[in-house]
Amino acid sequence: MPATYLEFITSVLNVPLFYVRGNHDERYREYPPGGEDLHGRLITYNGISFYGLEGSMRYNQGAIQYSDVDMRRLVLSAAPRLLPRRWRYGRGVDVLVTHSPPRGIHDLPDLTHTGFKAFLTFMDWYRPRYLLHGHVHTWDRRATVETKYGDTCVMNINPVTLLEIEPETKQGT
């Protein structure tokens, strides 16, 4: 989405913006939208933790594309921040925000829209409550847009989804 559109929406609604870049968002480096790029970052807002992984499967020489091996390295690099949280709270993060879907969940057979196997590993290791992704267009709302994988609710939020998330009450707090 154009950065100016995202800025307009957040200013009209007076809400914070958390995002990851998609395979067509190369201009965000020069002209980022106002907000927080979650890629490789753990951010907590109002008691809910977010982590992000940008991009799509590599299908040409685009800057925001990764092989599954590249993405697996990014998932592994999250371990020092997320595994202690998982051991302490039962999950490493509340919401994983990605551009692409996990492999076999809401993805398509063409390379551009193939999901990452590494996201399955992320869900197995860090047990997010939600994995929110876009990338695969679902104008036909008969398409499956919500799937349970282990402890995680995987949701395709394209083209738009309103989701209200309450912080979990941690045992002993």
Image (tube, rainbow, N blue to C red):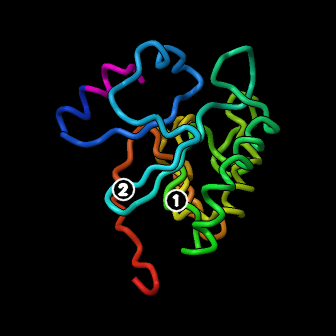
Task: Assign the C terminus to one quadrant of the image.
Answer: bottom left
Percent across and percent down for residue 120 are 72, 55
Residue 130 badge:
1
Residue 163 badge:
2
Q: Main secondary structure of the magenta part?
A: helix
61 shown above or below 77: above
User: Element under label 1?
Assistant: strand
Query: Most extreme residue toward the right, as rendered?
Result: 69
Residue at 67% in and 55% down: 80
User: What's drawn in magenta, residue-wise?
Assistant: 1-7
Percent across and percent down for residue 46 are 31, 59
Residue type indicated by callout 1:
Tyr
Residue at 58% in and 75% down: 88
Residue type indicated by callout 2:
Leu
Dot 2, how many residues are within 10 Å of its Cα: few (below 14), some (14-19), or many (20+)? Answer: few
Q: Which of the pair 53/76 is nearer the observer? A: 76
Q: Quadrant of residue 12?
A: top left
Contact between marks 2 and 1 (CB within 8 A): the answer is yes
114 shown above or below 46: above
Q: Quadrant of residue 54?
A: top right
